Amino acid sequence: MNNQKWRKAIQPKAIALAAVLVVSSASAVAQNLPDMGITSGDPWQADLFYENHTAKRESVGVSKFRNTLQSEMSKNLNDGWRFRGILRGTYDGVYDINDKEFGKNAGGAVQMGNASGPGADYVLTNVLGAPGLGPYATAMVPYGGGIGSTLAQALAGAQPTNTFVNNGVIPGGTSYAPWNQNSGLQILGAGWNNSNQTGGVGLAVPVRPCDYDSRGCKDFGGYGDKKKSELAMPEFNDRLDFIREAYVTKTFGMDAGQSTFLKVGKQQVVWGRTDLFRVLDVINPVDYSRNNIYDELQDIRIPMWIAQAEYRMGGSESMQDRNLSVVWNFDKFRPNNLGQGGTPNSILDAGNFFRAMSNCWDNGCTVANFAAAGFTTGNNPLTGMGTMGAGGPLGQGYGGLATNFGPGVIGIRNVDLPNWSLDNTQLGMKFEGVTQDGLSFSLNALTYRSQLPSLRGGKGATNAFTGAYQASNPYLIAFDVVYPRVNLLGGSMDFQVESLGAAMRLEGAYTSGEEFANTSRPELYSKNNVWRSVIGFDRPTFVPFISTERTVLFSGQMFYQHIFDHQLYQGLYGQYGMPDWKDNVIATLLMKAFLMNDRLSPEIIFARDFRAGANVAAPAVEWSATDNLKFKFGANYKFGPSQQQHQFDDARNANPFDPYTSIGQGVGQTTGLSNSEPLGRFRAGPIGTAFGQNEIFATMRYKF
């Protein structure tokens, strides 16, 4: 690797240096803070940590060079109050070290699928004696080189009249302005599917940071529109994310041994008893852009300004302990960070999908294999979508023609981020207790805004081929992003099973108000109730060939999700309706050993998404070289079946462009024409959409 790039990556810039000084000096300053009349005589307790996380990804190279400084401090204040704070600053040099993948030089020119071009051209020229498709007769065309405007123009090989601008010369010889050019692009989903090459819908996504390429940049709630410096140093923003924790606590004594505990400030509230996937633990949003699902939840939860009050009632005749707590998240709404298009981590490939669709709305775009060629294998012209002249049915390796859309036709139109108001705050209540025989349990209720976005389709847009604006377009793939209100009821328990020598964990939650993609609805979404649950166990077990002195920890979990009123139908070419599975199970298993007086700890984690057929294995070994210096080396490898498992209705022939995409039975009558994009990601899940992201990594953590 170029040494100059390494030097550039680790060279502190002005803002990075300021961030480092703020965090690294916090511990030293804390030791010498004056009491100022508000603190007790107890000294500040402060620790400072440095961590480097370097990862290398197959076919990509360096995917992370993250340097983190974290300061943890606490102090007893006057009148029984106690303060705790955590400051964290991060600088990820990957955007300089590997700028051809993730920085200012990322992406390039792309080719868009045009699978029906050769077959349609053959029918036109050799059967009908009509003008051929000319430049559109190839199976792939450059981005910006699709057909457009009207079917007649397309079949005549004419230059599209309703298209976006392009800086190159595309069929017809017309030069275009320099924005939305065929550069700085990647094919959406290319890391986990090849839909663009095999007749499926395909999109191109701009992948450079937004200060180098603003196409498709939108604020989805704290992400989606970030410059390179903001991506490299994500904590330093207008939400002050470098403050990981800053809260005060106090316990107020009451009669009969009861008390009230108060905790107010920026904090994480942990309701759940599970790891990796969340059931009850949904009060804080999660930053999946940091390292997908592979960092500990405590490191990727996004702290919020929250007030907690806990009434500690003590024991009773049937209970050892009882507590009733109220949680009020009064912070401005914040969704999960799903990653920005072009960054190393984008769970479900969602950040890339959002940016590609936003670019389509703002600037226009080429969609691969979208428009029907309009010919059957019998070489008879139809007005609707049929079977390609090349000899195969749509959805089975054959698609349509690459199609240009102008701005304001398809894509993500608007992001509806809730403003701060009392109605948009989140309120929860939990009762927890311990029975006389040692069973711990909780009952939970929460009303909150969904931290995952809903895409509501059927919005007003300009018809790409008539030029007319319609205030409402059923089945049109033009979306508004919203975050609906969700209500949750659930509970958890854990107990010992002495006969098995194991601790069991149970957790469940019923939610109402969640929204899911649904291609059987004119608005392309539906509102459904959901049940989620998990059963977990932890068992220390002697494994003689590993160690005869220390046990190996086996920790397993089974996550289950059921969607009520699930809609799924069989169309001419495949299923349509809701891509999310009606019932699904994800299982995880951790095996962790402790050797060399607990200084060496090898582990392996397995996870399987049963309906997606997607798997991941993550071996690692942690070595404590000293009490203050720790290293960890590991990898994660994903594997599973072919893409066929992840395909779902792409709704292209349900769009209101008759006869361009429908089959003659009217707009909105989808046939279930299926491919991986765009909805297959919901079937592939977070593991399946990361098939091309196998990595090896090393971390070093030092406590000063």
Image (cartoon, grey):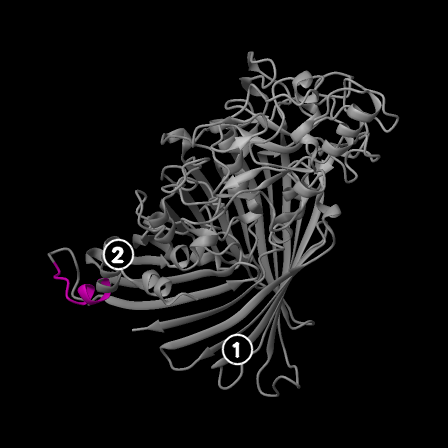
Residue 481 shown left or right of residue 40 in the figure: right
Quarter of the image with the C terminus in it: bottom left
Q: Position of residue 408 (x, y in %)?
A: 51, 22
In the rendered view, tell whether residue 496 sits above or below residue 394.
below
Instruction: In this rendered view, identify the residue nearer to me: 443 or 62.
Output: 62
Instruction: Judge by depth and name the residue closer to the eye, 618 or 251.
Output: 618
Q: Secondary structure at mark 1?
A: strand
Q: Which quadrant of the structure image shows residue 2?
A: bottom left
Pointer 2 or 1: first along the chain: 2
Q: Which mark is drawn over residue 601?
A: 1
**Res 506 → quadrant:** bottom right
Q: Quadrant of residue 57?
A: bottom right
Regarding residue 194, the answer to whether it shows in the image is yes
Tell me where residue 10 appears, x and y as whole percent: 32, 63
Q: Residues within 10 Å of mark 1 (few under 14, many from 20)?
A: some
Disc 1 residue type (three-letter): Ser
- The quadrant of the rendering that contains the N terminus is bottom left
Dot 2 corresponds to which residue?
A: 13
Amino acid on which the number 2 mark rests in the picture? Lys
Tag in front: 2 or 1: 2
Residue 656's tag is none
Residue 423 shown left or right of residue 43 in the figure? right
SS at mark 2? loop
Q: Is residue 484 visible?
A: no
Residue at position x 22%, y 61% in the image = 21
Q: Please say if 147 is above or below 687.
A: above
Q: Position of residue 422 (x, y in %)?
A: 37, 30
Tell me if 683 is positioned left or right of 50 in this view. right
Where does the magenta region start and end?
A: 26-35
| Residue 644 location (% of width, % of height) | 75, 46
- Whole-angstrom CA distance, mark 2 to mark 1, is 37 Å
Q: Is residue 27 shown in magenta?
A: yes
